[in-house]
Amino acid sequence: MRIKLPILAIFLEVVTIVLFGVFVRYDTQNNTLDFQDVHVMIFVGFGFLMTFLKKYGFSSVGINLLIAAFGLQWGTLLQGFWHMHQGEIKVNIKSMINADFSTAALLISFGAVLGKTSPVQMLIMALMEITIFACNEHVVVEILRATDIGASMTIHMFGAYFGLMVARFLYRPGLKIGHVNESSSYHSDLFAMVGTLFLWLFWPSFNSAIAETEGAQHRAIINTYFSLAACVLTVFAFSSLLDPRGKLDMVHIQNATLAGGVAVGSCADLNIAPFGAMLIGSCAGIISVVGFKYLTPFFASVLKIQDTCGVHNLHGLPGLLGGLAGIIAAAVQEAFSVLSPFLPRFFC
């Protein structure tokens, strides 16, 4: 570690600086987007969310900072290569937000392998994943033209299943469910709740950050706001319902309460009405709690996948729900736009 980490970190930074020097230039157009909310989610929200393991708190926050700092630089390059102008990558606030988005996918995957990887392995994983992420995002958004303003599919589903794939390769039979290193303490759970609250509060900014019009951004904020609120109620209800003694599970409260923000992401900017957003959030909370209760043990015992932070339940399943919700919302909106001249006014 003493030799490998310094060599790899310095090598990656030198290569990145050279590539920035060759390709990256300032964008002359002014951009008023506010990226700081997303930035706080990446470095504070995700970092502290993963501190629930009492023996990996420093690793959670520290490695999160390391790979996020490299990821946003590498993401700027890889995403910029798809949108070059005259051989140059123009950087502005929007490109910085998109770089943070690519880093978010990496940090989601980090949650699946937390406690099983070294900083060197995580830097290599960051290099590979963000490269694949940029290609996947280009195909989904630019070629297939999918509706995914909050990136339920391109960030959350991609990050979750990429992390699960890596976790499967890193499976160690000796680490059974309930291993001493997988436990939490009062203080580690408290720190994790700090991360939860930061993510919960800033998620409307995440889903609306790159909306193209003020109206779309307005809808994305409102829909995410109500989806998250509805999600919390169903999470608390089902967490208590599924426990034989009716107690709340802190794992559910720390993670599943965020599922509403993930699930509503794909259709956040569409006219789904507040009740539609609340319905999506409620369903996301239910499937997330059920996933933590039943799917995580199944993955570990049968599929040999040790999902440390339960990213499949917070990002994978709600991301899938978000993709389906986006398809339905887009189809309904298109149908109404076609049929609106023939419908009574109160239907439109």
Image (cartoon, rainbow, N blue to C red):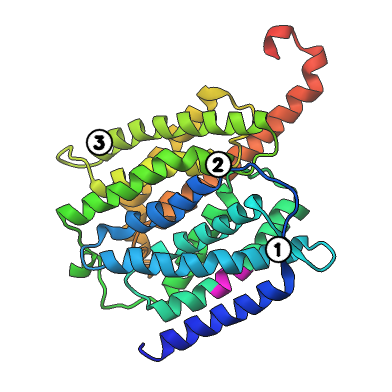
Q: Earlier in the sequence, mark 3 or mark 2?
A: 2
Identify the amino acid type marked 2.
Asn
Whether residue 18 is visible here, answered yes or no, is yes
Which residue does the numbered mark 1 point to in the structure image? 80
Tell me the CA gap for discs 3 and 2: 30 Å
Q: Amino acid at mark 1?
A: Gly
Choose between 118 and 262: the one closer to the eye.
118
Query: Are circles 1 and 3 on residues that touch, CB within 8 Å?
Result: no
**Dividing the picture into quarters, in which one does residue 245 lie?**
top left
- What are the residue bounds of the magenta stretch? 127-131
Query: Foreground mark, 2 or 1?
Result: 1
Residue denoted by label 2: 207
Q: Give the mark nearer the N terminus: 2 vs 1.
A: 1
Q: Which type of secondary structure does the marked residue at label 3 adopt?
A: helix
Q: Position of residue 292 (x, y in %)?
A: 33, 51
For numbered disc 1, what is the local secondary structure?
Answer: helix
* Residue 213 at x, y percent in the picture: 69, 34
The x, y position of residue 331, in whole percent, is 71, 33
Q: Residues within 10 Å of mark 2 (few under 14, many from 20)?
A: many
Is 143 situated above or below 213? Answer: below
Q: Is residue 91 left or right of residue 230?
A: right
Instruction: Between label 1 and label 3, give the one nearer the viewer.
Output: 1
Name the chief secondary structure element in magenta: helix
Q: Residue at x 48, y 45 (%)?
A: 37
Pointer 3 residue: 241
Q: Who's the residue at 60% across and 27% down the image?
A: 272
Q: Amino acid at mark 3?
A: Leu
